[in-house]
Amino acid sequence: MKNPRNELCPFCKFVTRLARLSPFLSSEYVHLLRKELQTLLNEEGNQTTAALCKHWDLSPELLQSLLIENLPEDFQGVVDGDTIYTTSFLDSRQLVLRAILCAITKVTPISTIQKRVGLTTKRFWIAFDNLQALGEVPGYLVGSRTSPSCAYRPKLYDSLVKACVMNQFRQNEFLQISTLKTLGVDAKALEEILGSVNYKNLKSLSSIHVSKSLLEQCVQTVQEELQKSGISEVRAALHPLGLPLEASDEDLIGEKVAEVEKDVSFAEGFVFRASILAEALKSIDEQLVKRAHAEVDRLEKEKKQGGGGKASAKAQQQQDDNDDWGDKKGGKGKKGGKGGGKSGGKSTGGTTSSSTASGSATIQVAEEELENWLRESKSVPEEILTVAVERIGQEATTTLRKKIQEIQALQLVANAASSKKSLVAIGAQCRQLYDSFNTFEAATTSFADPLGSDLRQYLLKTIGSELACALLSYANGADNAHLLKEKQRDETVEALPDALRVPIRALFATLKSSEDGALDAFHDAVYDCSVPSATSLALRKTDKKGRAEVGAKLCTELREQLTAQSDPATTLLLAVLYLLAHAGRPTTASGKFVAQLVAQIKDSCSETVFELLQACQKGVVTCIKNKDDEVAKEMLAENIGQLKEAVLQ
């Protein structure tokens, strides 16, 4: 048997048939198998049972019974499942594993290491455990052994990471969060690496950790740029520092600067002082003056054309867009102008004196217009132009209105001083206002309290206030009392002669009273102001015939206004006031009274009109509360159209 493999293979089939019949032959055959197995193992180091069955043309059962189960005690190998290893092979694989573990310097998946070692999972972990028991594993496992993501993390890697992080922090005083994630360093590990003192002084931004001193340097750098010109772009200011900052990090630094600096704001990557906005507003003063003169000319033109009252009412409607239309108690709604000022003024013809003031109070500087002005003035960088528009928009509007009022006041003073006709006009206005006041007051008695008392109180605060200002203008000789602030008005009153000062002061005092006798006190004060020793206007309470004339005139004017009106809320209020005036109950009111006044009209209008009034009132409230509800707006517009048609027919 010089070549057992060649001699055994042809003999296998024959021996297989005789194995159970001849113990002697079986023993000899098994001996040959053992001998060849040892040869194969010495050559390869391991053999699988499947390979042996194929090599010897044996069934797995016969190989198991003849060879595997009868291996001698001195067999230098290990049977592991369907694989037979030599001890030297396993020892060599274990040494290979040891060498690989010692050579690895980064976190490596166990599957990769196992593939390089060339062992089954079971034998791999046996070899790993043997090395671990001998203290030959210079690292540790990350994750469960049964997990596909199980990895080996060498201690050398931890040392390298620690050295890398420490050196980077010492040199740069910052650590990028993305780098730490790549290195697998979490907050706890970072604290262990840096030490508690350094870690506590570490300031976290969006994408980077920086030392406290470096953050202070960043803030100081931006502050220095800010002091030079009052404005600083954070990105440009920090660029010389060479820090890998993202936009979110720069925003945090900018906000930090705004916190520590007084009167400094941050927006759109810029920090800037409030003085920048003040200078921006100052730079558009010329445009504001031009706009103010243009608005004054427009208001004067409307006034001369008789449209001042309408413009005023429309402006008041926009100003009081959030009036409490659904408050049936007439409680906390703002003083309404959705037709209330319009109806009262038109009934007297006296709102022309206050139309320009009301108009100027609602004039605004549009954002686009302000943006164009600032861009032309080049007072703020283009990057923060939008921010500047938002910040100074309201102030620009206030300045514009103030300039308009100043121009109006100067014009009124000049007009009053140059012509005595102004006094005649003011006197006529006073008479018309007082006639309207008496007409409205008489109508309020037809409403039960508390509605009647609320309407009288509203009448006193509106028409009564206009009459008081008109009397003051007449006494002062200048039609500007409605433009004066309270302090200026009081100073004007105090400058009057005693015969005028005392009754006019008492008249304004009644406007602030909410007591039951306020109206009587108001009438007494009006009488005192109109006696020969005061203004000689001889204002008297209107009789029934005079009230009827005022009511008829008011009814005509309300119809005209209702016909021309398109705003749903104002249209509803005008319709209510028109129906009341048509029924002989002329009233001045604001939006907050609509719900209560609608109930008063039920007996003086058709059922269709009443239902439309209720539907429109609910629709107005819904649209005010839900301004983006397009369906509600369409339904309201349809109902308003039907209401106008029904009321005006």
Image (cartoon, rainbow, N blue to C red):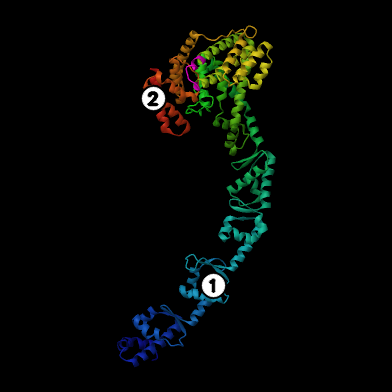
Q: Residue at x 46, y 88 (%)?
A: 74
| Residue 366 location, quadrant | top right
N-terminal of the two: label 1 or label 2?
A: 1
Q: CA distance from mark 1 to mark 2?
A: 91 Å
Towards the viewer: 339 or 518: 518
- Locate residue 18 relative to residue 493 in the image: left or right: left
Residue at mark 2: 611
| Residue 471 location, quadrant | top right
Q: Is residue 235 above or below residue 51?
A: above
Q: Residue at x 63, y 47 (%)?
A: 253
Towards the viewer: 527 or 188: 527
Q: Is 125 contained in the magenta span?
A: no
Q: Position of residue 351 (x, y in %)?
A: 54, 16
User: For the residue marked with disc 2, what is the amino acid?
Assistant: Glu
Q: Is residue 222 above or below residue 372?
A: below
Q: Position of residue 508 (x, y in %)?
A: 62, 18
Q: Residue at x 48, y 20 (%)?
A: 448
User: For the residue marked with disc 1, what is the amino acid?
Assistant: Ile
Q: Secondary structure at mark 2?
A: helix
Residue at mark 1: 100
Q: Quadrant of the N terminus?
A: bottom left
The part of the chain drawn in magenta is 441-451
Towards the viewer: 42 or 185: 185
Q: Position of residue 456 (x, y in %)?
A: 53, 19
Q: Secondary structure at mark 1?
A: helix
Q: Is residue 103 above or below residue 351?
A: below
